[in-house]
Amino acid sequence: MSENSEASALLHSMIHRTEPIKVKDRLGIPAQAMPELDAGYRARSQDEVATGFTADMAQLEAMRCLQCKKPACVEGCPVHIDIPGFIDFMAKGDLQGAVDRIKETSLLPAICGRVCPQETQCQENCTTGKSLKSVDRAVAIGRLERFAADWERKQSQVKIPAVKPATGKKVAVIGSGPAGLVVAADVRREGHDVTIFEAFHKLGGVLRYGIPEFRLPKEIVDQEIHTLTQMGVQIRTNYVVGRTRKIQDMIDKDGFDAVFIGTGAGLPIFMGIDGENLVGVFAANEYLTRANLMRAFDKENSHTPIWPGKKVAVLGGGNVAMDSARMAMRLGADSVKVVYRRSEAELPARKEEFHHAKEEGIEFCFLQNAKRVLGDTTGRVRALECVRFELGEPDASGRRSPVEVKGSEFEMEVDTVLVAIGNGSNPLIPQTTPGLQVNRKGNLIVDEVTNKTYMEKVYAGGDIVLGAATVILAMGEGRRAAKAINQMLEG
């Protein structure tokens, strides 16, 4: 019997039972596994890996929710979606009610349901998971959010959020990543005119250039942005604030009553080792931008050049490293190795992404790190000189610190190195706007409650403030900033 057939049979028995469903009964419903494409096929395809719940699987999974009176899951969500509320609608089969409840606080459910680390946020706090002593058995909140959003998108009509009467106030949003999109939506709902200024030719920020198609299909990003334009948000692409226009001029000359800066963390960080200037060494950011935004994977329709690596090493252990490694495999690499100086237990990437990468043939080289990149006589990468590590005492983050094993150097034959050890905040706007203040890492300093900068009428949020973080944390920053902007404009 297939997983869906089992779900359908169990769902039928739950719906048609005569007595109320008790907590014990809900805890006895098995967690529904997400259907996925075969690893051998998907490792060479841009098709989305997770294919999504069926309607029966989604409703059955929703029935696992205990509907807690004090839902800790909501506290774990940076944008505070009414999680029990939307799941209750799904458990009763009211999918439109579920979508409407989600969109009271988030206009990006199809995106959040795919890329947010629910296992360390809402699902980590789930009472069902705690009762069963495993976060893996918590209610699959993200997958249910994704199902509800996908269901609405497949209908002929997506409901557009209501916009209050025009106030005559103007707000500029610089950057169209997760934080900027949330600010644009929340401010526009209140009736203010909103214009998004984007440096690239397409909107979406990291959703567009950073996250691969096989994790987040770009048609979904397009649909979410289309919703904003239907709400009346104006779009200006190929517009580099700081060069095309200074922020102070936007306020003094263009008449904007408030400005939100959400330009992200797109400045690559390198290792600082010998050989990083060799042909075949790339920042993961550039590599993914070429592949995603510029669609280098679509060789028939795109003329974007990309390095044809066959033996690829990826340095780093976060989600960007996973995306880079999996993309390299899809672009034709024969072997891909992720080199990480700690053990699997300290790997910062999502467990799901690590699991998918291993299934697709990515090799993980734990307790190793690059010491220098070696080149051939033509200046191209031929190998990595690596060194082995062992774990010592925990550092300030709580993870055990890697300690180099003396004399353990060895060579790893590669022709491509992708550096995915992090990104710094975009420095252009701080450099061209004297009134802004930054910390030692180059991140904008803002008020923790309002996200207001040291400049009047100027707010900021997302990775430009946090450093490289998650989509949902950036959205939470946008939510706070939008609330403060709306209050300021009302006052």
Image (spheres, rainbow, N blue to C red):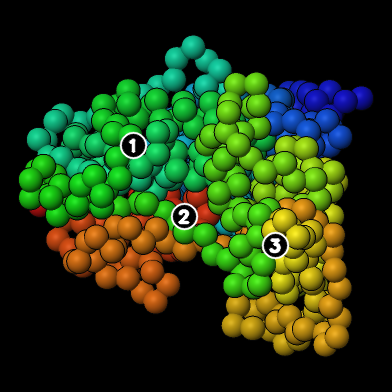
Q: Nearer the viewer, residue 150 or 203?
A: 203
Residue 71, given in percent of the width and then of the height, sits at: 53, 53
- Separation of marks 3 and 2 at Cα, in angstroms: 17 Å
Q: Say which label, 3 or 2, has the lower sequence index.
A: 2
Q: Depth check: 216 or 163 in front?
A: 216
Cα separation, mark 1 vs mark 3, equals: 32 Å
Residue at image location 66% in from the left, 72% down from the top: 274
In the image, taking residue 287 as reference, residue 230 lies left or right, namely left
Residue at 38% over, 26% down: 227
The local secondary structure at tag 2 comes to loop
Q: Quadrant of residue 175?
A: top left
Disc 1 is placed on an element classified as loop
Q: Which residue is mark 2?
A: 266
Nearer the observer, 278 or 165? 278
Q: Position of residue 127 (x, y in %)?
A: 64, 55
Read off the residue under disc 3. Answer: 315
The disc at residue 238 is: 1
Label 3 amino acid?
A: Leu
Earlier-in-chain disc, 1 versus 2 = 1
User: What residue appears at the point 84 percent right and 37 percent down from the top-left corner?
Assistant: 39
